Each structure stands twice: as C-alpha cells, then as structure tokens.
Amino acid sequence: MAITITSLTAFILILTVIPFSQAALTADYYHQTCPQAENIIYQTVRNASIYDPKVPARLLRMFFHDCFIRGCDASLLLDSTSGNKAEKDGPPNISVRSFYVIEEAKAKIEKACPRTVSCADALAIAARDVVAMSQGPWWPVLKGRKDGCMSKANETINLPSPFSNTTTLVQSFAKRGLNVKDLVTLSGGHTLGFSHCSSFSARIHNSTDPTINSEFAMTLKKKCPIHNKDRNAGAFLDSTSSKFDNDYYKNIIMGKGVFGSDQALYGDYRTKGIVDSYAKDEKLFFKEFAASMVKLGNVGVIEDGEVRLKCNVVN
C-alpha cells in the first residue's frame, strides 16, 4: 500500500529537498593522493561479484538510494545508534544488501592512502564498476565528495516507490535537479534488479492491473501466490538479469514491467517516446545512462563533511 503524507509533512519535505550540487568534482581528484584507489575498488567489487552474482544490482541500487536522500554523501552506509535510527534501517532500505563490499574496499584504501578517499566517492566508483562489469557502459566518475555525518530512517519516505505514478516520479526527480529523461534513463538500472513479492503483488492479485501482460501476470502469480510464506520469493526486473542491456525497456513495451512505476513509464506521453527510443537503440541508452549517472552523482554533494575512516560510523 502506498504511503500517504499530510500536507504539512509534504511542505516540510519540499523545504528540505536536496539541491543539485555546485561542488567542483573532478575525474582526477585522487590522481596524486591515491592513484590506486579505483583499482582497489574495482578488484574488490569484481571479487565480490564473482562470489555473489547479486552484488552488482545491490551496489547500483545502494548508490541511487544514497544520493536520493541527503545527496551522494554515503549517509546510507551509516549504522543506526542507540539514539538514532539510520537510513539503512528505513523501510525502503531494509532489503538493501552488500554493504560489506564497500566496507572491504574502504579498509584496503585506508591501508594504501589513509584519510584520503571518501566513502561517498568509493560508492560512486563501485556503482560505475558494477555496470561496466555487467557489459554496460563505462564513464569517468567525478570525485571529491565528502561523507555526511547524519542519517535518518524517516527521511527514506523521500525515495521513489514501486507504486508511484509517473507524475509523482517526475516531481521527485525534479526536486533533485533531474529531468524526465533522467527519470526514464536511470530507471533502466532495473535491468540488473530483483524485487521481492511485496513490491508488486498488489498488481497481480485481487483486481489485476490492466497495464500488465496477462501471461506475465500469471507467471508472477506463480512466483508470488496470495499466501506466499517465502520471504525470498520475487522476480527479476528483466529477463537478462545479470547483463546490463536495454531488455528492461523492451519488456515495458510488451506490458512486462514488474513494478507499477516501471510500466507507468509507457502509459505517459512524457516518457513513452524515451522508452521506445531506448528499446530500439541500446547504444543510445548506454550513452544517456552514463550521462545521467554523472548527473545523479552531483546531487547534494557536500564539501564540508569528513572522510570517514570506516563507512558505517562517523569519525
């Protein structure tokens, strides 16, 4: 069931929206101070992905969820404390996994270049690497972010919901300096995604969502029966789940979007044409995805934070 908020709360959220950052990030930020940082992150992420094929999707989602709350400041990586419930324990983030990968990469970087590379930059680099490892595009990650010192679970209400309609999504992205094309482009990250039943079961039981392909709905019903007791049950968000490609958009055109928010992109005049163009031209999608990821990586960047020694706790 979608979460509703009062007008007062909505007004407060609008006032606290993360602005598009004007911070000066550069691709060669660590060229002199820690030239081995990107290779350390790559090797760590690669090894983790070989051991657990779910890692790429998890790290890409982690980056998105981090940037959408307080900006790209690694606040999602902070643990809750006795006096504060952190973002990672907010309802939408309970299923975010593989924090250990960033922790491991950070520990190795601290040995090589102490107090130099932020957790926020490490996560941004890792998100790029998992896309490239999955046969998707590569792009030079702009660096120079600092780590935030605050993380609040109740702010995760600002994350886009799999139940959202396109208008809600457009507004949510706009508050972060991201346009309609960025919305459709970044949604393509779901090509690596997996969803548990709770995020889409409402579409397939009781009154079936008319926008969903009937045969596909039956397939989802088998995976997620009404009285499902398997907490791990769910579905991949496209049919080539380990490969970063444009299959996600082809599925939406066929009415096979798993999330209501994904399928809604093909029912709105503002987004339908972009879905069509990416379904036809994978190279175009790759080019635009790289550009939108750079843009996402600039959301709410802070320059007055700290470089955490460990990503799960403030210094």
Image (spheres, rainbow, N blue to C red):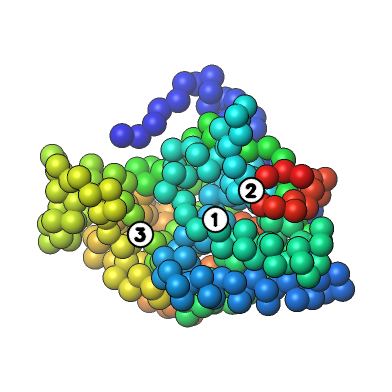
Res 315 label: none
- Relative to 186, does residue 154 appear above or below in the rendering? above
Which SS class for mark 3? Answer: strand
- Marks 1/2 in contact by CB < 8 Å: the verdict is yes
Res 194 label: 3
Type of the residue with mark 1: Phe
Which SS class for mark 1? Answer: helix
Find residue 3 and report its image quarter.
top left
Question: Which quarter shows the C terminus?
Answer: top right
Answer few, some or many: residues within 10 Å of disc 1's Cα (few below 14, many 20 plus, some between 14 and 19): some
Which SS class for mark 2? Answer: loop
Residue lying farthest to the right in this orientation? 32
Q: Position of residue 269 (x, y in %)?
A: 38, 54
Most foreground residue, 256 or 121: 121
Q: Which residue is mark 1?
A: 99
At a point 74% along the width and 57% down the height, the residue shown is 118
Type of the residue with mark 2: Asn
Answer few, some or many: residues within 10 Å of disc 2's Cα (few below 14, many 20 plus, some between 14 and 19): some
Question: Which quarter shows the N terminus?
Answer: top left
Find residue 38 and report its image quarter.
bottom right
